[in-house]
Image (spheres, helix red, strand yellow):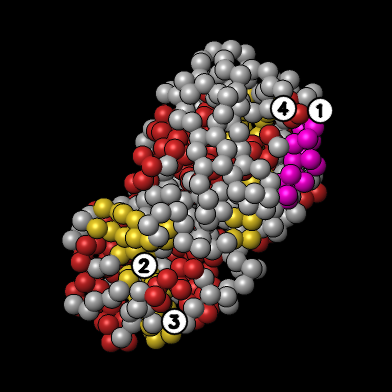
Amino acid sequence: MIRPSRVALAALACVLLLTGTACGARWSGAQRESVLSRYRAGGTATGAADQGPQGGAAGDTASGPAAGSSGVAQGSTSGSKSGGSASGASARGGSGGGGAAPSNLPCAAPSNAPGITASTITVGSISTLTGPVPGLGAGAQAAIKAYGAYVNANGGVCGRKVVIKTADDGYDNAQGRSEFQDMEPQTLGMVGGLASSDAGYADLLTADKVPAVTEALSDQFQNAPTEFDINPPFGDVHKASAKYKWMVSQGVHKAALIWFANDQSRENMQGIEKPLMQASGIQIVNEQELPLSTLSFDPAARAVANSGADYVYFLAAGNLNSSFARSMANTGYKLKFEEFVSAYDSDFVSEVGPAADEEPVVNWIRFVPDEERTTNPVSDQYLHWMAQTSPGVQHDIFAADSWASGMAFFDALQQLKGPITRDALIQQLKATTTFDAHGFFGAINLGGKLTNGCLVGVKVVNGKWQRLTPDHGFLC
């Protein structure tokens, strides 16, 4: 199975590395965000969760204070759409206390599983924070800490406080493997984060039967039997997708694809996006593989205009997106849609200036847009706790996935029929055929490792992102 997000991420990272923009000093917000390519998954369903309390900052190893309330953050059930809320927990969750309050859930029973004590559940999370692509996983690491702080402030999980051990892989497989080996005996499983090194310890995950719910970035890790990818692949890229069927309904019949000359970008465009478009009836009329040394996008933009395309899909990084948008605007040619896979939750709008409104700039995302936080309790929780526990860390698209990973992992724990064991948790995750992070996230077949291909389309209007389609929920 082909997994668009991983390939596109690798493609953008490759562009940055080969052009030198990812080397040297720590990235600016624009550079870091530009490597985060948008993926093709999502879902439907609604749900709610109580607003978390103010405060409760997470540390490096423990996510927030334990609450004095007796409730726990309830999650979705296996095989059905989630509609749970943080029921029973005080919305203002107290501070202090020596761990989460007692619980009558079966999973609160005594357990000798790794990472489990009478008062704590310890999990691990590895992210890429330094190395040639510094800051790549900063948002993802911040988000899993934020989720831990949220559940602890609402009573913990299975009668215990959640402790999150985090590590930096330095964009190095050997370092990632070493960090995993240090963590594994002390942790129940791996949750959230964004680790470019996951291929370096995928065999250990399998051999030790460690449950994991993360954003997999390698085939080896995604295919590990105990890994449950929060962004799973399509089962068949030659089947019409909801996104492209909708675009056809809006008059898109001809598309242009533009990418930079590296294997990852080529695989993403020709092996994933092209067949998805063609399966929905869109003709590819222009394909451009640009040299990494490209300085001006004027010729590429004119080629798009001359092709008669209705839609352009541009796979690049950083200010290359805004440069192409300005070049496209200068042609005077009007497209129906102009997509930049890494534009949302980046500095794209401020960089591109007026051209962002002149051109029909769109993105497709798998979670409720940040701009709608007042209408979605979980989105509001996510953004609130990110701000509380990691002020200044940008909540990028992988942060949203990391938050959802935490929900999926701990929701499954609370559904156990008896004491916590790794095997029992793995079986519960396998049985979770529909997961939607309580309506924050597009529903996926978590246990089956398949996407439903559901998305929210967003568009730049008057210098701000707003929902394009559907009117509510997710397009599936």
Residue 342, image x, y percentages:
40, 59
Please name whichever residue, 239 or 397, is drawn nearer the observer in this view of the structure.
239
User: From which residue to which does the magenta span run?
Assistant: 416-431
The single residue placed furthest to the top in the displayed view is 97
Disc 1 residue type? Asn
Q: Secondary structure at mark 3?
A: loop
Q: Is residue 168 visible?
A: no
Q: With respect to residue 259, does 158 lie above or below?
A: above
Q: Which residue is mark 4?
A: 105
Q: Nearer the viewer, mark 1 or mark 4?
A: 4
Please name whichever residue, 199 or 118, is drawn nearer the observer in this view of the structure.
118
Q: Which residue is mark 1?
A: 112
Q: Are marks 1 and 2 in contact (CB under 8 Å)?
A: no
Residue 86, image x, y percentages:
55, 31
Q: Is residue 304 visible?
A: yes
Left/right of residue 337 with respect to residue 215 in the rendered view: left
Q: Residue at x 62, y 42 (%)?
A: 76
Q: CA distance from mark 1 to mark 4?
A: 17 Å
Q: Are marks 4 and 3 in contact (CB under 8 Å)?
A: no
Q: Residue at x 80, y 32 (%)?
A: 418
Q: Which residue is mark 2?
A: 339
Q: Which residue is mark 3?
A: 282
Q: CA distance from mark 3 to mark 1?
A: 55 Å
Q: Residue at x 66, y 23 (%)?
A: 160
Counting residues from the N terminus, which is met first, the one under dot 4 or under dot 2?
4
Counting residues from the N terminus, which is met first, the one under dot 2 or under dot 3?
3
Left/right of residue 162 with respect to residue 441 in the rendered view: right
Residue 32, image x, y percentages:
40, 51
Counting residues from the N terminus, which is met first, the one under dot 1 or under dot 2?
1
